[in-house]
Image (tube, rainbow, N blue to C red):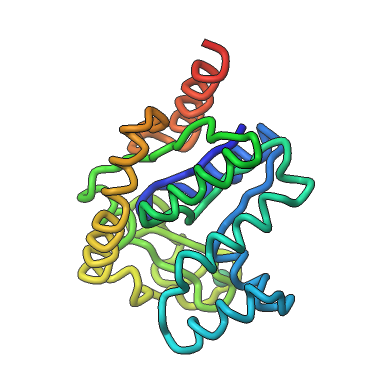
Amino acid sequence: MNLVLLGPPGAGKGTQAEKLIKEFQIPHISTGDMLREAIKNRTELGAQAEKYMTAGELVPDEVVIGIVAERLMQSDATGGFLLDGFPRPVPQARALDQFLQENGKALTAVVNIEVDPQILIARLSGRRVCGTCGAVYHVETKQAKEPGICDLCQGELIHRADDHEETVKNRLAVYSEQTEPLIQYYRESGLLLQVNGEKSIDEVYREIIQELRNRVDP
Ligand SMILES: [Zn+2]
């Protein structure tokens, strides 16, 4: 199962990723984590990436692609993988296709978790996070027993700057601007699998599994 997982902030992508890698016994390849790892391990590509990140610049496609290609060559990824955070711009998607083809592989599907932006805004802007232990709450769907106080450690609940409504709207706009061409690219190549992310975690998961099974064994 060679998968790419897409979804805007607040769509539950991380949760679905965890379930999918367990189900299919494949590694979760997150480019954000990998970049940090490559830098920590002082690989040649990691050193290049660090140079850009320290300067506050985007890491160029060829560096990101190099790091992903190195990762996909490792033995645990030969039976499948789940890519998260990569590709983003269409040239990265083309480079991925080319790399897989050269290695006799191809993507099985690109799972895109869709959620109405109004729902995402409500989900994200209602989030409160414990400043001490990091536990996550929500003003409507997961209230603390005592308002503003963490159930687990009595720490103070914080409304992170990232979760303020204007910031959320901005994050969503940036995401959709970046990924719209990518979604179109995968739609045209017949790999796109649209999933309604407005249902419960388990319902969304069942839909993904069913669609993937149909695709692999119609
Ligand atoms: Zn806490």
Vertical position of residue 126 compared to residue 90: above or below: below
Query: Horizontal and vertical percent for residue 147?
Result: 39, 67
Look at 33% across and 41% down and name the residue there.
Answer: 185
Residue 140: image location, x then y, percent: 32, 53
User: Residue at coordinates 48% horizontally, 54% vertically from top-left?
Assistant: 86
Image location of residue 39, percent across then percent down: 65, 77
Q: In this rendered view, identify the residue nearer to me: 118 or 38.
A: 38
Q: In the rendered image of this protein, does residue 22 appear above or below residue 148? A: above
Q: Position of residue 179 (x, y in %)?
A: 32, 52
Point out the quarter of the image occupied by ligand 1: bottom right
Q: Quadrant of the N terminus?
A: top right
Tell me the residue at 23%/50% (across/down): 117
Q: For residue 44, which quarter of the picture? A: bottom right
Instruction: State the residue in front, 60 or 136.
Output: 60
In the displayed orientation, state which residue is furthest to the bottom.
55
Give the quarter of the image for residue 68.
bottom right
Question: Which residue ends up furthest to the front in the rendered image?
Answer: 102
